[in-house]
Image (cartoon, rainbow, N blue to C red):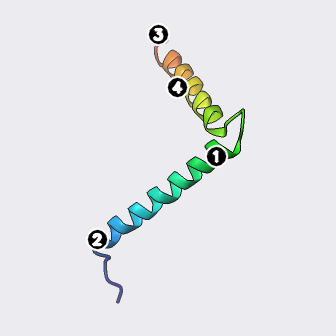
Amino acid sequence: MSRKPSSAAQGQALAEYLVALLVLTMLFGIAAGDDAVIDTLLTAVQTAFSRLSTFLSLPL
């Protein structure tokens, strides 16, 4: 029979995921040079949000 993990174990996994994401973000930001991947990603998110906002503001 399997046991449910304790909340401390779940918190540890969350911390490990955050550290891994931080390392990956730093690698993307540093390794790209002039055109940083993170800048391209943030520009794409900004453009998508702007387009979504414009679409939602159109009258029915």
The answer to whether the residues at label 4 and label 1 have Cβ atoms under 8 Å apart is no
Q: Which mark is residue 49?
A: 4
Residue bearing mark 3: 59
Helix or strand or loop: what does disc 4 sit on? helix
User: Residue 8 vs residue 25: left or right?
Assistant: left
Please tell me whether mark 4 or mark 3 is closer to you in this view: 4
Helix or strand or loop: what does disc 2 sit on? helix
Q: Amino acid at mark 4?
A: Phe
> Where does residue 30 sit, x and y in percent of width and height?
64, 44
The answer to whether the residues at label 4 and label 3 have Cβ atoms under 8 Å apart is no
x 52%, y 25%: residue: 49
Q: Which mark is residue 8?
A: 2
Dot 4 or dot 3: first in sequence order is 4
Please tell me whether mark 4 or mark 2 is closer to you in this view: 2
Q: Residues within 10 Å of mark 2 (few under 14, many from 20)?
A: few
Dot 1 or dot 3: first in sequence order is 1
> Where does residue 1 sit, x and y in percent of width and height?
35, 90
Residue nearest the viewer, comparing 28 with 45: 28
Q: Residues within 10 Å of mark 3 (few under 14, many from 20)?
A: few
Vertical side of 31 occupied by 52: above or below: above
User: Residue 12 vs residue 39: left or right?
Assistant: left
